[in-house]
Image (tube, coloured by chain):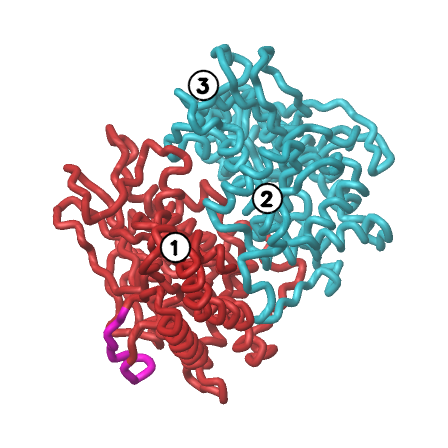
Chain colours: A red, B cyan
Amino acid sequence: MYERFWQQAGDKSTIVIPGWQSMSYFSDAGSLCWFLEPDFAQEIIRLHKIVGNAVTEDRHIVVGTGSTQLYQAVLYALSPQDAVEPLSVVSAAPYYSSYPLITDCLKSGLYKWAGDARSFNKEGPFIELVTSPNNPDGYARQSVVNKSGGILVHDLAYYWPQYTPIISAANHDIMLFTVSKSTGHAGMRIGWALVKDEEVAKKMVKFVELNTIGVSKDSQLRAAKVLQVVISSCQYPTSLGSLFDFSAHLMEERWSLLRAAVRQSGLFTLPEFSPGSCSFLNRSFAPQPAFAWLKCQLMEDCEGFLRSNNILTRSGKHFGVSPQYVRISMLDRDENFYLFVERLSTIHLRHSIQVDERGE
Amino acid sequence: MYERFWQQAGDKSTIVIPGWQSMSYFSDAGSLCWFLEPDFAQEIIRLHKIVGNAVTEDRHIVVGTGSTQLYQAVLYALSPQDAVEPLSVVSAAPYYSSYPLITDCLKSGLYKWAGDARSFNKEGPFIELVTSPNNPDGYARQSVVNKSGGILVHDLAYYWPQYTPIISAANHDIMLFTVSKSTGHAGMRIGWALVKDEEVAKKMVKFVELNTIGVSKDSQLRAAKVLQVVISSCQYPTSLGSLFDFSAHLMEERWSLLRAAVRQSGLFTLPEFSPGSCSFLNRSFAPQPAFAWLKCQLMEDCEGFLRSNNILTRSGKHFGVSPQYVRISMLDRDENFYLFVERLSTIHLRHSIQVDERGE
């Protein structure tokens, strides 16, 4: 979806790295995050300042191989090494389907997935993941566990103006971001964390050191260049507007096509959002999330039903809820997205025929 | 140490990536390792063929964020998910100091560090890491556990002609390599595994997917370019010779300086190696490892003793042996290396004075 913007941005976003550059493990040997490229750190701060979506003052920046690695770094950093039992990790359902898989894949003695935050009632300390806007359903979120002893981790991968109005600068203790959802460069595998507590930041750095001995310098240098172009597109917008104008416009268009298709089909529902005033885009609009969270009104197995209609989705059961729901990406290439909404809009006809046939 | 070669290689090794390229998570969606750049895979095969250090036929290539990530991917792939107790992981001491730290950092229920392979006598299945040439001591190695039920993992990061004669093409089930030790590009964080068994390769891919959703495309593209230049330097050597001629020559020079300094000081010993005939360089030479594994003859705490002489090293205790040993990198920049050997060579004088003063 973002490709066209970057094609039109042209050579400004091209990175050139000679063979003799960036050979060492170290980016900034003396700093807390010794593998963080200083240029990339600087562009992160500038970007948050211009977009107004997160406070960077009094924060340590930790770079990761995508925010996925940073999520694990946070778990490592927050779990006491000498605890009798693993720390519980919870998130309100529907939650990002990778959280439980990543948390439990090594059967760690440090932490353990404990499911839906809404039904969590175990005594003792815990980690609550707050994904806002939420993956998969797009709603803005706050902590839901009504208990002390919890440490909050805010996954803000989608808190950018193309997906949701920027209401205020997020000001939490641990905030995760990623280039894949902000600029579209998923293949870079670059994420960053803004971390208030120095000890937590140090332990996160330790994890990335143990896990991958730092983070690709090449991708950090490229990410710095790309963020620089994004910032400059905000300061001096061309005919396309800023990256956020461009992509917010596309998302608006796509959501309107999707809602039309859903109306035409009559078999599904989508989340409804209230508009909010975006301080960055200077207008009011309703969230237009990176995923469609679709509910089948009649079918129990929405994923299977859509698969039989040549639409590949991810079942709600992976997100801790009913298989009546599915998640569908709204960020695919144009041709795939148009094919998807076209197929979706025509389902009711064929479905009605099936129902009629069964009725006979 | 490698910088000069790459400077003289010039623009041929420069990578240029426009902003709209390599945006997707996927490199080759249909292949077993869906995040492996096909160009990089091709250069890996060509490089092993020309150097003759590893068999690539009937092997799956899995790319990782450095061989460190691949080490964890191997542990994950080889550990049964439903085992009653964690799989033991062993390696003959002195072993790479990061192995126990990485293995145990998350207190995994799947696998557990079980120390020196030579004293391992637990019943049941286990993983034996065979690092050859060995980090830290540089010796060529084979499996030492004399028991069935073991799965061997060969870490061949240093099996390149600048460090050791290439005697034959390694032909093991699981072999790990990394660009940081072959071309010097540690900052790329790129390693690769050659894996015989398809199921093991698939599980390794699954781990990298869970851990970091793939591997930086930018660094893979750069690694492909760099390997291409290495291969071409072997086929059409310039005045510097191939990368391996250049770096083998440097290593020889450095080892001869180091041995002279050790002789002059009289307080230390180094491993002694027998020469072997290298099929790639077409000559016989003794190993000239990436690390000096130094033993203090008089001091119990060699690391502390050298620190007091302004030489920073890593104590043998991290490698599972006595603190009489230390590991020192032989790959540092020229100025640091010369300073190190100079300081080492003069230690015996100052030390003798200290001994004399105490004796009075």
Asked whether disc 2 touches disc 1, contact meaning CB atoms under 8 Å apart, the reply is no
Amino acid type indicated by mark 3 = Gly
Residue A321 location, x and y as percent? 30, 50
Report the quarter where the C terminus of chain A lies: bottom left
Q: Secondary structure at mark 3?
A: helix
Instruction: Tell me where residue B28 sits by quadrant.
Output: bottom right
Instruction: Tell me where residue B244 sits by quadrant.
Output: top right
Q: Secondary structure at mark 1?
A: helix
| Magenta region | A272-284
Indicate which label's residue lies in the foreground, 1 or 3: 1
Residue B348 location, x and y as percent? 57, 28
Disc 2 marks which residue? B339
Disc 1 marks which residue? A302
Asked whether, in this view, residue B205 is left or right of residue A295, the answer is right
Disc 3 marks which residue? B359
The earlier-in-sequence mark between 2 and 3 is: 2
Identify the residue shown where x is 42% and y is 76%. Answer: A257
| Chain letter of disc 2 in the image | B
* Relative depth, front residue between A113 and A335: A335
Asked whether, in this view, residue B243 is left or right of residue A281, the answer is right
Q: In the rendered structure, does residue B87 fall within the stretch colored magenta?
A: no
